[in-house]
Amino acid sequence: MTGKLRRLSLAAAGGMLSLGAVLTTAGHANAAPTATYYGTYEHRDGCVYLVTSSGTPYYLPGYTMGGNGGLYKQGGGFIAYPGWNIKANGTAYTSSGGTTLCTTWGTDHRIKATSIYSY
């Protein structure tokens, strides 16, 4: 690869990375720092939630409810049954804009979890 072509490729890749960073933060308002969130697993209308001890429900995008009502990682991997204590490592945020069926409680709090465990 010539020096000019290599610089052009690196510039294009850098521009795509910058665009990707903008796209991943779009639609998120009031994001909190990465932390561990504790609560119980509950589901409503086919959507999965972590409900804190204070009663705040957080929708868990990227996780699904199985036929038995259990919480599963997308693509498989059982985590918990309803009522079990769970902890989610990730970032909590309130979604801005857009619509989803998973706003049962009238709020749109979410946790973008990197991992969820029962305990």
Image (cartoon, rainbow, N blue to C red):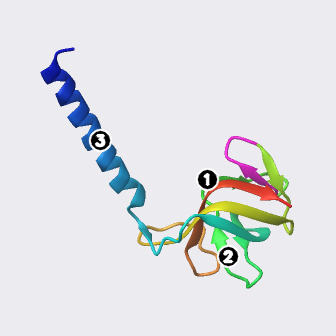
Work out whether residue 67 can be spotted.
Answer: no
Which residue ends up furthest to the front in the rendered image?
Answer: 3
Query: Foreground: 3 or 112?
Result: 3
Work out whether residue 84 can be spotted.
Answer: yes
Residue depicted at 73% across the width and 74% down the height: 51
Question: What secondary structure is found at the residue carrying circle 1?
Answer: loop
Residue depicted at 86% across the width and 65% down the height: 84
Q: In the rendered structure, which amino acid carries the disc numbered 1?
A: Gly
* Label number found at residue 116: none
**Magenta region:** 70-76
Residue 110 among magenta residues = no
Quarter containing the N terminus? top left
Quarter containing the C terminus? bottom right
State the residue position of label 1: 62
State the residue position of label 2: 57
60 relative position to 13: left or right: right
Placement of 11 over or under 58, stated as above or below: above
Give the class, few, some or many, for how many residues have Cα within 10 Å of label 3's Cα (few <14, many ≥20): few
